[in-house]
Image (cartoon, rainbow, N blue to C red):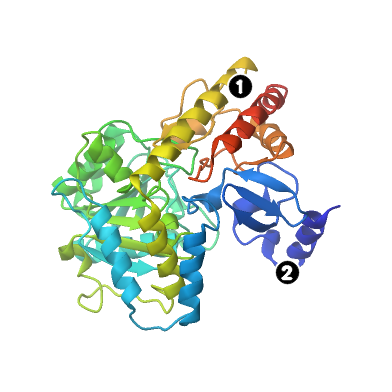
Amino acid sequence: MDRNDSLFDTARSVIPGGVNSPVRAYGSVGGTPRFLASATGARVTDAAGHEYLDLVASWGPALLGHAHPEVVQAVQDAATRGLSFGAPTEGEVELAQLIADRVRHGDVRPVERVRLVSTGTEATMTAIRLARGATGRDLLVKFAGHYHGHSDGLLAAAGSGVATLALPGSAGVPAPIAAQTLVIDYNDPDALAAVFAEHGERIAAVIVEAASANMGVVAPLPGFNKLIADTAHAHGALMILDEVLTGFRVHPAGFWGLQQQAGEQYVPDIITFGKVIGGGMPLAALGGSAAVMEMLAPVGPVYQAGTLSGNPLSVAAGIATLRLATPEVYARIDASAERLSVALDAALTDAGVVHSVPRAGNLFGVAFLPEAPQDYATAQTQESFRYAPFFHSMREHGVALPPSVFEAWFLTAAHGEDELAAIEAALPAAAAAAASA
């Protein structure tokens, strides 16, 4: 046993499952989770002193690399002025302006007002309440395989048909709450049309990940996000674009900006943000038009509050991160993602493993299917048993991957030539391990 094993034993005696977020328990890959002690740049070090090249990046926030000196300094400076005030601060205003200013394409600016909160779950939960308050309707449409946090109405499992009200997807979720969510197949225009034909006058909003990254990386088909916006608006409903993961990760204006740049033009009513906007600190946000956002208290009837909303340390980290997230940073990460995607594909091909390497901007991963899946049902059919040996081989060669095949891989601006070459060198052995599973 090393320090990780003993820590996990102790953790399980005081923390449910030994972890504070389920995927960290290594349930789908087996073995002992690595308890991280420190991180810098592209590398993390566990409690036993083992160092790894990191492709988790705190599940996205470490866009610049871990512990970027200027971000750390901003947090330290903020801490000297106080840890929490429960009152407005100048930093909140600056960060809100930064978010609103970045989410634009030409004259199109879908974010006119921003509300800061503490977690992605809180952002999506608030967005849904806001959509219901703005429309006076109750029903929500979501897509199978999309994750929007763990609030009750979003932990809904698909029913037996397109227009069937959902059932609870977790113990502790009352059936009447789950029944307010309609779950349909992703990337399926017919399913979208059918659910609005059946329930259109009662639907408050459609919520969708800008690009899915919680059933593996599954990008929207060309035109699908625009179709969601057009369909929702034609029926008096809103579109909630969940960019908690993709926001400012794949483009200076998020995945929405990437799509605008590619010519797919649509305007969501509410966008949720998280991860990158906190620079590694707990912070999230929702933004949208002034007309919709000013339905929130204290100017409107939709209530939302939080003692730690806009925490000054988190805000300082977010401001520093966004100011440092230049076009050059995105270009570097894009190039690194392209390079590693090609190397991953080549290694698995050489090992004779049936696979695809799905991409959405600079997010990528592996699917053990001959073609990249387009929906959750297809993603579930892959030979996921091949991922555990692949994962452990990479770790043995000093590379830390997400501990689930259904997660995206994240690069940072700190992954340079040496780091990329070392990851490439680890891939053939991992591919061979996957082939022998």
* Residue located 23% across and 40% down the image: 260
- Indicate whether 292 appears above or below 168: below
Question: Badge 1: few (under 14), some or many (20 or more) residues near its Cα, within 10 Å?
Answer: many
Q: Judging from the image, what secondary structure is the residue with disc 2 in?
A: helix
Q: Residue at x 21, y 45 (%)?
A: 229
- Name the residue carrying label 2: 14
Apparent side of residue 1 relative to residue 89 in the rendered image (left or right)? right
Q: Nearer the viewer, residue 93 or 391?
A: 93
Ranked by sequence position, the earlier of labels 1 and 2 is 2
- The residue labelled by disc 1 is 347
Residue visible at 24% across and 48% down? 199
* Above/below status of 296 relative to 121: below
In which quarter of the view is residue 223 placed? top left
Q: Is residue 35 visible?
A: yes
Give whichever of 388, 159 is nearer the camera. 388
Q: Which amino acid type is marked by label 1?
A: Ala
Task: Please provide percent x and percent y for residue 357.
Answer: 50, 28
Farthest residue, direction right? 1
Amino acid found under the numbered disc labelled 2: Val
